[in-house]
Amino acid sequence: IRRSEIASILKEPKIGDQVTVMGWVRAFRNNRFIALNDGSTAGNLQIVVDPDQLPEEVLKQISFHACVKATGQLVESQGAGQSVEVVAETLEILGGNNLEQYPLQPKRQTMEFLRDKAHFRMRTNTFSSVFRVRHAIAYAVHKYYNDRGYYYLHTPIITGSDAEGAGEMFQVTTLPIGDPPRTEDGSINWKEDFFGKATNLTVSGQLQGEIGALALGKIYTFGPTFRAENSNTTRHLSEFWMIEPEVAFNDIEDNMDLAQDFVQYLINYVLENYLEDLEFLDQRIQQAEKNLPQDKRRPMGLIEMLRFVVDNDFERITYTEAINVLRRSKPFKKGKFEFEPQWGSDLQAEHERFLVEKHFKKPVIVRDYPKAFKAFYMRLNDQQEGVPGETVAAMDVLFPFIGEVIGGSQREDRYDVLLRRIEEMDIPEEELWWYLELRKFGGAPHSGFGLGFERMVQFITGMTNIRDVIPFPRAPKTAEF
Ligand code: 4AD
Ligand code: MG
């Protein structure tokens, strides 16, 4: 079907051209002006119809989110708000919309309401912008690594290992659920499963990524990961996408450099290529925050903040320094944190937000965490002065509003040290035999990290709930579509 995309019409309008466009009605004003959108861009194209020329039956069906086809001449627009418009000569209803029955209505609707209407929410201005930007970031991820000589490695989704050792896996099995075959001692006989062993959905592609790095040098993964943690927050999903670069010969410093350069690139790519969507999202936030008190509003606009993050180096501090800063600080009116910051306990969201939003006022990379609450694969640091306990070469990148967007580390590349750590943590050695062999035969220092894709999309779009930046969110008690 010959038609023009609204994106190309708005980008290079050829006044006087006869055009055919198809799309969904975003608004219909005064029985005359259609704001039409076909998904190709944030901007709507104005279609002017003459109500006296249209059959009553057609006119009646031009309504919110109906699908129409219009043909007419592209002219300069006299009205405010748009530079060009199409004067419709013919107008056809492709998909009528009975507004009385349609789940959405042409008024402001809450994100919570729209979340239950995942089959229609993408037609709203907000969600179509969010998912265009999501696409843009995904494309920029591949472009960034490809342009720098990294190889995209596909790691398995079904696996026998628990990369994070946190036990938050979704199990995968073909055994009958109610009555699985048992061994003599009464435990489930996994040998009779399709895979011949207990398997789960991956929580991270890192361990297999390390196999790639120790052969191809520089790899990255980009795939779905799964966590069966019962976290009902605005930052957690049960199914989310992760990007995990893994690089042979990189130490923790190189790893931090890569993390900063990478996320700045992603933000910059969207600023340069999807500014219209960002402008729309920016305005949307300002609208929403208009009636909030000053201290509840964002300190700067969305685009202003994105530029700030691109233009400034991230603060880099050790975990020990972070604890010292937090212990010296009086964060809120009450003068104390809910959880007292203490060397040896993990940083809480309130601590991370304080460091980023109140203290340094920029993204922060915290490194060298106590080994006690970090994963087995992180490289043990030499004892450092003024540090009360053992630490590992871990790094978390913390962002305003979001908190942790990246977690990573230099990996333990010393066979003996790794083996001791695995024993210490009671991880069954037979599960990691191949991981240990990578250290035994031709090992090398190497580092990597994982960027939570949805958290990045959240930061760039300014959406407050992570469920609104993935088309079909999976979270506790949420798997409709
Ligand atoms: O910090 P995490 O657990 O690190 C890893 O999985 C490492 N294996 C990564 C690596 O070194 N290759 O997760 C990495 C990132 C977090 O910083 C966060 O942004 C995101 O993944 N993330 C989640 N995003 C949404 N929902 C969840 N439930 C998430 N859990 C982690
Ligand atoms: Mg983490």
Image (spheres, helix red, strand yellow):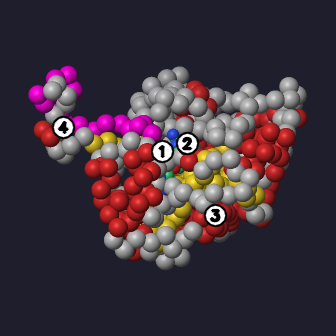
Mark 4 lies on residue = 190
Question: What residue is drawn where x is 67% and y is 36%?
Answer: 348
The location of residue 75, given as percent across then percent down, is 69, 61
Dot 4 or dot 1, earlier in sequence: 4
Residue 403 lies in the magenta-colored region: no
Crowding at mark 3 (Cα within 10 Å: few <14, some 14-19, many 20+): many
Q: Earlier in the sequence, mark 3 or mark 1?
A: 1
Would you call the spot at circle 1 few (<14 residues within 10 Å), some (14-19), or many (20 or more)?
Answer: many
Q: Cβ–Cβ below 8 Å for labels 2 and 4?
A: no
- Kindly identify the amino acid type of the residue bearing the numbered disc 3: Met
Q: CA distance from mark 2 to mark 3?
A: 20 Å
Determine which residue is flagged by label 2.
373
Q: Is residue 122 above or below residue 479?
A: below
Magenta-drawn segment: 166-184
Q: Inspect this view and state whether residue 448 appears.
A: no
**What separation in Å lies between label 3 and label 1 (alpha carbons)?**
23 Å
The three-letter code of the residue at mark 1 reads: Phe
